[in-house]
Image: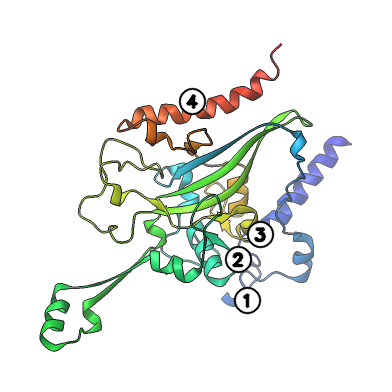
Amino acid sequence: MKLKHILLTGLGILTINGVVAQANILNAKIPEEIGMKTEEQLLLDNDEPLEYGYVDDRDRLYSKMTWERVVLDERVNFPLYYPVDTNNIGPDRRSLFHVLWSAVKSGDIPRAYGDSYFSQERTYEELLQSMRKVDTLDIGFDQFNADGFVDPEYIIERNIEAYDIKAFLLKGLWYFDKRQGEMKYRLLAIAPAAPDVNFIDGDDYYGEDSIGTSGDVGGDNPNQEPIPLFWVFYPEARGLLHEAKAYNNKNSAMPISFDHILNSRRFNGYMYKEENVYGDREVKDYIKDNALMQLLESQRIKDKIRNFEQDMWNY
């Protein structure tokens, strides 16, 4: 009987999740009906992110705040990066940056911040100015000197787009829950990172000696090192990231939400900073010009947290 209940439960979960991907695609009579769910499907979905459980401060036996970089050049992180071109793809497929930036623009994410400590709140207009560059061609300057005006065709506008994002920066808290006796992780903030828009199209791109805060090699060219564009308090964005689906390369009938990917840590990240007595200095601040040693230091931080849980059960 137990096996029968398990099979029925699993079949029910697969049925409910299956209708999420391209809903009604097999029953649509016109293209506009693709993605439209019936009232019965909406009632069955109950499509809400899994709520975090309450954790009392007294139950945190140990905790450590860390900052990670998720480099988008790595294949395992591709679901967070693609698609970067939305012209020839359906509205149900968007990159993580597009989802976050659209939500900030529309106000669905009410607040964005300039730092990971949530001390500098930024408006959409302020963010837009930092992500846009307006330049004039040389021929435009010649025209202005001669005629006193510049034709719009000689003015170039450059905006940060999804394909410019090189990494995502994550801030989270590792803590040991003494009630459940295990180490857990709670994601607190996320930020897309891209090179400075004023230098993004420069001739020289990356150096060869060190790793920047986003995980890309670029220590010799600080202007080209990806920097966080804005920080978002993750719990405020969970609802949107749960509704937005990433592509599942193994089964397109069951896409994975961005919230699921991030909370289940289905990505590869490198710790570039931990809270410390030196004002939360980054790894590159005390290990300079040596990418290999920086990676080893990142692994040491990760192992230190992981070993705490293992040591709890050593007698």
Q: Amino acid at mark 2?
A: Pro
Check residue 300 in the rendering and tell me which mark sits there, or answer none. Answer: 4
Look at the picture and state if 139 lies above or below 315: below
CA gap between label 1 and label 2 equals 38 Å
Residue 15 occupies quadrant: bottom right
- Name the residue that disc number 1 marks: 29
Q: Nearer the viewer, residue 145 or 131?
A: 145
Label 1: how many Cα within 10 Å (few below 14, some 14–19, many 20+): few
Q: Residue at x 60, y 22 (%)?
A: 307
Number of numbered discs on residues: 4
Q: Residue furthest right?
A: 1
Look at the picture and state if 157 lies above or below 172: below
Q: Residue at x 49, y 41 (%)?
A: 68
Q: State the image coordinates of residue 114 (x, y, percent, origin top left).
A: 48, 57
Q: Secondary structure at mark 2?
A: loop
Look at the picture and state if 238 lies above or below 143: above
Look at the picture and state if 308 lies above or below 120: above
CA gap between label 3 and label 4 equals 34 Å
Q: State the image coordinates of residue 27 (x, y, percent, origin top left).
A: 66, 70
- Name the residue that disc number 3 marks: 239
Disc 4 or 2, which lies upstream in sequence? 2
Q: Secondary structure at mark 3?
A: helix
CA gap between label 3 and label 1 equals 31 Å
Disc 4 or 1, which lies upstream in sequence? 1
